[in-house]
Amino acid sequence: MTDKQPSKSSEPLAAADLSASAEQALSALDRAGAQAVQLVEAWVKAGNAAAVAVSSEKAQGAARKAGRRGLNVLKARGVAIPSERHVANVAGEKGPEVEEALLLAPDSGGSVCLAITSRSATSRAHSVFVALHDELGIHRVNVGDLSQSQLKDALSRALPGADYRPVKVPVSWARSRIAAARKAHLARGVPEPLGFSSAASLLEPVPSVAEEHPFDGEGLELGDEDAQDLAKNSHALHFLPEFRGWFPEKPAIDEMLLKVGEGLTPGVEPAPEELQQRLEAEVIAATDRYFTPDRREALARVMKDSALSILAREGEVRTLEVVATMKNIRAAGLITNPPHEIGFLRAFFDKAISALAHQDGGRLRIPIPQLVGATPDIAAT
């Protein structure tokens, strides 16, 4: 291994980190971040065998490899290497374990990610990440011992594309939520993903009594009239990152477009006004068909998870709009307050039309059943 000088374009490594003891080595590597390998190489150059030994055993990725190479360099120089027993105890006395649970708000399919971690002041976080759907069960389980920066990276990768941050939730509630999803998973007769056995210490004990949702304890409640007033512009909630990617399922979109085409004449370009009227009528009908009582209840329940994220970032005023919309969704009916009168629900299909038109250069492909195999390009308005 050749000795390398720190890059002139990078920040200089702290003097304290360069002379780190075995007990300080891991925290020094965390602070070094992208310069972790450079720090290990500086330890090798300085003959800091204790820190190099720790990096070879406890570091992650490239820094650990650099530590292993560095040990060989030091041995070749005749430098005494600390015993294995000493390396294994570099963390010293562990302090009390602190448990924490984090929730990453649902994606467009209603899947959430819950993370539970346990760590002391001197240890890495023993962590489990569980991606789940309340009705379908467990998608995946990942277990590992992570530094703070690695924990953040893992959370950002948990639900790809999620443009929002995780929020803290009670550990007992998170355990209860995961246990309920496991029960739903087993009820479907599908084998569980691997990882639960090694995560048992983080997932137990499970509360014997179901706990209320963390959002219910925030005290954000509204009367019927206030909810109606605050939800008038609920379609705008789709601009929030928690809801931006929410769309109806593809079969519902296909059915809506098929019904638009049923009233068009094959081979005849409809007038823009006629197409707009048919689209608006079918959006209304599709919204009422799609948002059945069961689907509305499930949607309102999932929105409660999102509300925790919105509250943490946007504050109470914007979150009350979400509360009002949830209340109206639950109160909707086919005769009074039909789903299409709730802007948030109708916006699902409005967004779908806009997205399809955008993908096809501003044109919307409307299937016409009377003409077999024909899907003429219809100008989107």
Image (cartoon, rainbow, N blue to C red):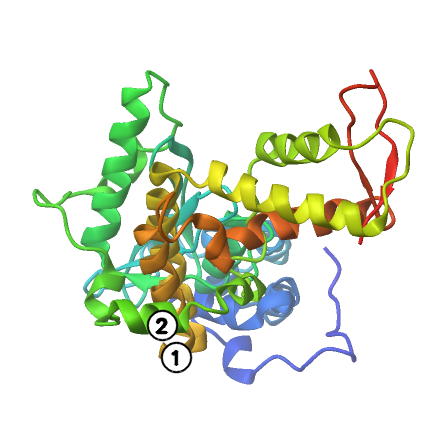
- Residue type for callout 2: Leu
Front-most of residues 349 and 2 = 349
Q: Is residue 210 visible?
A: yes
Front-most of residues 290 and 238 = 290
Q: Which quadrant of the figure has residue 21?
A: bottom left
User: Residue shown at 39%/28% (left/top)?
Assistant: 194
| Quadrant (top left/top right/bottom left/bottom right) for the N terminus | bottom right
Mark 2 lies on residue: 320
Above or below — where is 106 with respect to 252? below
Front-most of residues 242 and 299 = 299
Q: Which quadrant of the figure has residue 167?
A: bottom left
Above or below — where is 155 with respect to 202? below
| Quadrant (top left/top right/bottom left/bottom right) for the C terminus | bottom right
Above or below — where is 130 with respect to 211? above
- Residue type for callout 1: Val
**Residue 54 in picture, x, y percent from top left:** 46, 57
Mark 1 lies on residue: 317
**Residue 361 in picture, x, y percent from top left:** 87, 49
**Residue 192 in picture, x, y percent from top left:** 36, 24
The answer to whether mark 2 and mark 1 are in CB contact below 8 A is: yes
- Judged from the image, the secondary structure of the residue bearing numbered disc 2 is helix
- Callout count: 2
Residue 352 is marked as none
Q: Is residue 124 visible?
A: no
> For the residue carrying disc 1, how many other residues have a C-alpha within 10 Å: few (<14), some (14-19), or many (20+)?
few
User: Residue shown at 75%/59% (left/top)?
Assistant: 2
Specify whether 10 is left or right of 157.
right
Marks 2/1: CA–CA distance: 5 Å
> Residue pushed farthest left?
208
> For the residue carrying disc 2, how many other residues have a C-alpha within 10 Å: few (<14), some (14-19), or many (20+)?
many
Specify whether 261 is left or right of 67.
right
**Residue 369 in picture, x, y percent from top left:** 76, 21
